[in-house]
Amino acid sequence: MEERGSPDGDPARSLEQGPEGLETPIQVVLRVRPMSAAELRRGEQSAVHCSGTRTLQVSPPGGGPEVAFRFGAVLDGARTQEDVFRASGVRRLGELALRGFSCTVFTFGQTGSGKTYTLTGPPPQGEGVPVPPSLAGIMQRTFAWLLDRVQHLGAPVTLHASYLEIYNEQVLDLLSLGSPRPLPVRWNKTRGFYVEQLRVVEFGSLGALMELLQMGLSRRRSSAHTLNQASSRSHALLTLHIRRQTAQQMPPGDLGEHPAGGKLCFVDLAGSEKVAATGSRGELMLEANSINRSLLALGHCISLLLDPRRKQSHIPFRDSKLTKLLADSLRGRGVTLMVACVSPSAQCLPETLSTLRYASRAQRVTTRPQAPK
Ligand code: ADP
Ligand code: MG
C-alpha cells in the first residue's frame, strides 16, 4: 500500500485516530532506535527504513528480497520520546484503566534494542545528575498525564502502585521495605491472579509516584543478577491500581468491567533473543532451548488467542508468572499495547526479523476468544 504521499504524515496521530480501538486487544507499535555510537564506529549499515508512518521495509544486506511489515505506528530513530508517547496511544489505555479495565503496555525486543529507554528513559549519567525531562520515557509521561486527568475528573479516585521483577520464575518486590524474597502468585475469584504480600503503596501526587519508580529502578540496577549481567533475563512490572468511587456506564463492546478496579501495567520484558517466532502454519513456533519460560509462555498464549474458536479457559495463562499477571489484559478485560523495539543495524537483522514476526503475529489477535457456537 502506497503511503508516502499520505497527508497524514504524523505517526504521533496514527493510533489516536481510527475506529479500530477496542476490537484489537493487542495493539503493536514499532520503534527503531538510532544507530549506536559503537555500531557507527564499526561501520555497520542500516537494514531497515520506514516507509510512511506505518510500514517498515527490511532490506537484507547483499540484496535479498525486501520485506515489509505494517504496524499501528512505526517510529524511526529520529522520533523523540514525546513522539513515541503520543503515537503509542497509551493515553487511550489510561482512559480505559480509569473506567475499570486492565491495560498493559509492554516493550519487546532483543537486549540493547531500546526497551528500557522507551519505557523509562536513559539511566542517570552519574550520582545526582538528573535526566533531562525531554528524555523521560512512556512511563513518566503517562504518570504525569494520569495524575492530571484524575485531578480534572471530579470523582474521587484512589491510586496505588506496585513494582516487581520476575527473574528465573521468581517474583521479587522492588518496593519491599526489607530485602526482597520470592513471593507466591495466587488466584481468587474477585482478584484474579495476584502476588501475595506484594507491597502496594498508595500515592497522591506525581512526586510520590516518581519516587516509587526511582526506588524500583535503582534496585533493579543494583540487584545481584544485574551485576551478573543477567538483567536481560528479568521482567519488571510496574502496576498502577485505579479505583473510582462512582459506578461507570459499561462502554460499548463486549468488555466487562472489573469489579476490583482498573489497572495500568508497564512491563519491561526480558530480552527476546533466543525466542524465535517462525511458525508457518499459523502457530507460533518457539525455540525449545530458550531459557525464558515466561517469554515462551507469553508467545504461546498469544498464538492461542489468535484462534477465535479457542475457549478462554484453555489458554494456558498458568504456565508462567508473567502470563498469570498479564492474563486480565490479554484475555479481554482491557487492551494490551506492545512496543516492539529493534536496532537498525544489519548485524542485528536475524533478531530484528524475529521481533518483527512475533510483533506481527501479536497484532493479528483481533477477536476475543469465544466458545464455539
Ligand atoms: P534494552 O532495554 O532493550 O536492553 P536499552 O533501553 O538499555 O535496551 O538501550 C540500549 C542502549 O541504547 C542504551 O544505552 C540506551 O540509552 C540507548 N538507546 C536506546 N534507545 C535509544 C533512543 N531511541 N535514542 C537514543 N539512545 C537510545
Ligand atoms: Mg533493558
Image (tube, rainbow, N blue to C red):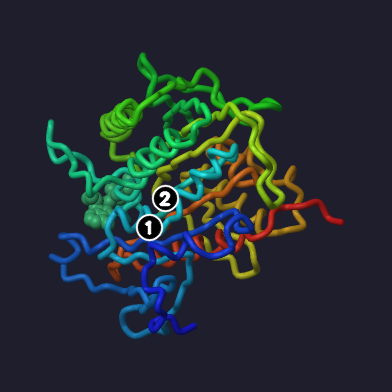
Numbered tag placed on residue 107 in the rendering:
2
Res 274 seen here: no
Residue 199 sits above or below residue 138 on the image: above
Give SS at disc 1: strand
Taking the view exactly as shown, the residue that stands out farthest to the right is 373
Res 200 seen here: yes
Taking the view exactly as shown, the residue that stands out farthest to the top is 178
Numbered tag placed on residue 18 in the rendering:
none
Label 2 packing within 10 angstroms: few (<14), some (14-19), many (20+)? many
Residue sitting nearer the eye, 93 or 278: 93
Residue 203 sits above or below residue 50 on the image: above
Q: Quadrant of the C terminus?
A: bottom right
Residues under labels 1 and 2: Cα distance?
7 Å
Circle 1/circle 2 CB separation < 8 Å: yes
Label 1 packing within 10 angstroms: few (<14), some (14-19), many (20+)? many
| Disc 2 residue type (three-letter) | Thr
Q: What residue sits 39% from the left and 84% below the top?
A: 5
Give x and y (percent) for residue 234.
Answer: 40, 39
Give SS at disc 2: strand
Give x and y (percent) for residue 107.
Answer: 42, 50
Numbered tag placed on residue 341 in the rendering:
1
The answer to whether the residue bearing label 1 lies less than 8 angstroms from the nearest atom of ligand 1 is yes
Residue 70 sits above or below residue 212 on the image: below
Q: Earlier in the sequence, mark 1 or mark 2?
A: 2
Q: What residue sits 55% from the left and 20% below the top?
A: 196
Give x and y (percent) for residue 27.
Answer: 52, 57
The answer to whether the residue bearing label 2 lies less than 8 angstroms from the nearest atom of ligand 1 is yes
Residue sitting nearer the eye, 263 or 277: 263
